[in-house]
Image (cartoon, helix red, strand yellow):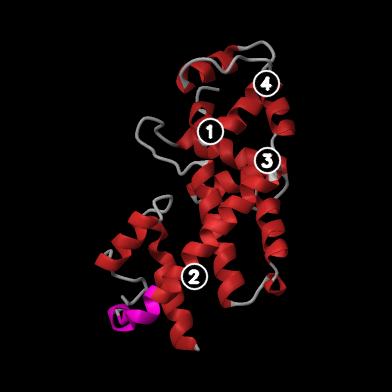
Amino acid sequence: MKKLTVFFYYFSDSRFSDILENFGVSNKGRRKEIINQLLESESFQENLLLDFLYKAELQNFCKAVDIPTTGNKKRIWGRIMQFLESIDSNSITIRNSSDMLKVNALNIAHRFEDYWSYDKNEESALKALKNKHPELTLNDCKEAFSYALTAYKEAIGIVESNTESYSIAFSEKQEIKREIKPFEKKFLEKYNKLDEQDCWIFDQIYFWYILK
């Protein structure tokens, strides 16, 4: 049961509060202490937690830790528990739900802008993001998508102005060997909700640029 501590750190403050409210546990105090109170609460049951959570939430957690996302909720939950049992909770860092919202928003912005997906309709793209994060409000998803799309469009201009810098070599496994470029660092300073892990968008834009 203690392994669930890592799982609960994944959630945003607002979503974690929803979980606590569902089990009648106070949200006052530090996250670690509150998690212990939740796990020790007579009202807490693992099967009730599974019923409360959305399948998409479980799948996003799986993406955050790089394990398969297929199957029904029960199967996904079993896979998550196996993962939690296999790790050292003191040495692992997991991308949280806010990170996964950002990743999903960037992916949708990429498909929206480069592939004209969702019929190039922002409402359809927003709906796709909401489907991935049913626990969030529509306004939260709208804000995340708008931020990601604005950043992605600016990244396109950066790549188009620096195409020679993106003529980089590949290893035999086709993995990109790169360092963060000075103009990318400036971009990250401006869009400070993003981090170096999100610089895949520059390479993705470059590949699309040369394919065109």
Say whether disc 3 or disc 4 marks the residue closer to the N-terminus: 4
Identify the residue under disc 4: 21
Percent position (x, y) of residue 50?
Answer: 70, 32
Query: Where on the picture, by quarter, is residue 210?
Result: bottom left
| Amino acid type for the residue under numbered disc 2 | Lys
The residue lying at 34 percent from left, 71 percent from top is 176
Q: Is residue 196 visible?
A: no
Horizontal arrangement in the rendering, residue 127 relative to residue 148 (left or right): right
Q: Disc 3 to disc 4, how far (Cα)?
A: 14 Å
The residue located at (45%, 83%) in the rendering is 209
Amino acid type, callout 3: Glu
Q: Which residue is mark 1?
A: 7
What is the secondary structure assignment of the residue under circle 3? loop
Residue tagged by mark 2?
153
Q: Residues within 10 Å of mark 2 (few under 14, many from 20)?
A: some
Magenta span includes 165: yes
Q: Find disc 3 in the rendering and name its residue.
A: 135
In this picture, residue 120 sits left or right of residue 147:
right
Of residues 205 and 81, the one drawn nearer to the viewer in this rendering: 205
Res 51 → quadrant: top right
Dot 4, how many residues are within 10 Å of its Cα: few (below 14), some (14-19), or many (20+)?
few
**Please, is residue 47 above or below residue 199 in the view?**
above
Amino acid type, label 1? Phe
The answer to whether marks 3 and 4 mark residues whose Cβ atoms lie closer than 8 Å is no
